[in-house]
Amino acid sequence: MPLGCRPGATFKVVLKSDMETTKAERPWFEFKHLSKSAWGDLVTETRKKIGAAFEEIETKIKEDKEQKVRIWAIETPDYTNLMLAAGLVNWGNIIDPDTGKPMPFDAENIDHIVTRAEAEELLAAFREQEFNAEERKN
């Protein structure tokens, strides 16, 4: 059965930078499998969210031109973060650098965990439904 049709089908991704860590300590990110159609729907939905946010930002800027830079910096939605948050279903071995304790899963906080380059790596893996070689064995 195609992966996009399997209820609850997921796959794990390990960042290239984490591949050298031991399997027991290796951070991983788990995504849901999407059909090609579901991926297209997600892209469309995300673009609509961003478009609506930009319209709202433009209105605020017209009302307060002095705050233009601040408004853009604070309120501009990030396509990559929205897409990752929509596809992430879990993560593991993610450690809070301030406390040294495991961070509970919250897809909305992905931007607090990964760098821009790592976010792009995760998005590419999600888009291509790529999973790591060891995950294929399962």
Image (cartoon, rainbow, N blue to C red):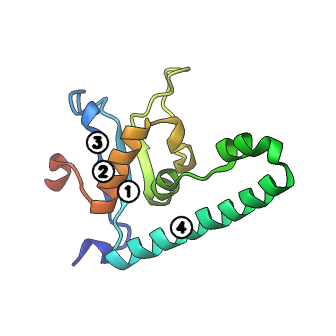
Residue bearing mark 3: 14
In the image, is 137 to the left or to the right of 52? left
Marks 4, 2: nearer the viewer:
4
- Given the image, on which type of amino acid does mark 4 rest? Arg
Residue 71 visible in the picture: yes
Marks 3, 4: nearer the viewer:
4
Residue 138 visible in the picture: no
Residue drawn 50% across the image and 54% down it: 85
How far is disc 4 from disc 2 in space, using C-alphas? 25 Å
Above or below 40: residue 71: above
Q: In which quarter of the image is residue 56?
A: bottom right
Secondary structure, mark 1, is strand
- Could you tell which of marks 4 and 2 lies nearer the N-terminus? 2
Task: Give yes or no for contact between labels 1 and 3 (Cβ–Cβ under 8 Å).
Answer: no
Residue 67 position in % (x across, y down): 79, 42
The residue nearer to you, when weighing 127 against 68, is 68
Residue 136 position in % (x across, y down): 16, 55
Residue bearing mark 4: 47
Question: What is the number of the mark on residue 31?
Answer: 1
How far is disc 2 from disc 1 in space, using C-alphas? 6 Å
Q: In which quarter of the image is residue 9?
A: bottom left
The residue nearer to you, when weighing 2 against 53, is 53
In the image, is 87 to the left or to the right of 133? right
Residue bearing mark 2: 12
Give the position of the N terminus as an image quadrant: bottom left
For mark 1, does the 10 Å Cα neighbourhood hold few (<14), some (14 to 19), or many (20 or more) residues? many
Secondary structure, mark 2, is strand
- Given the image, on which type of amino acid does mark 3 rest? Val
- Given the image, on which type of amino acid does mark 1 rest? Phe
How far is disc 1 from disc 3 in space, using C-alphas? 11 Å
Residue drawn 81% across the image and 56% down it: 62
Secondary structure, mark 3, is loop
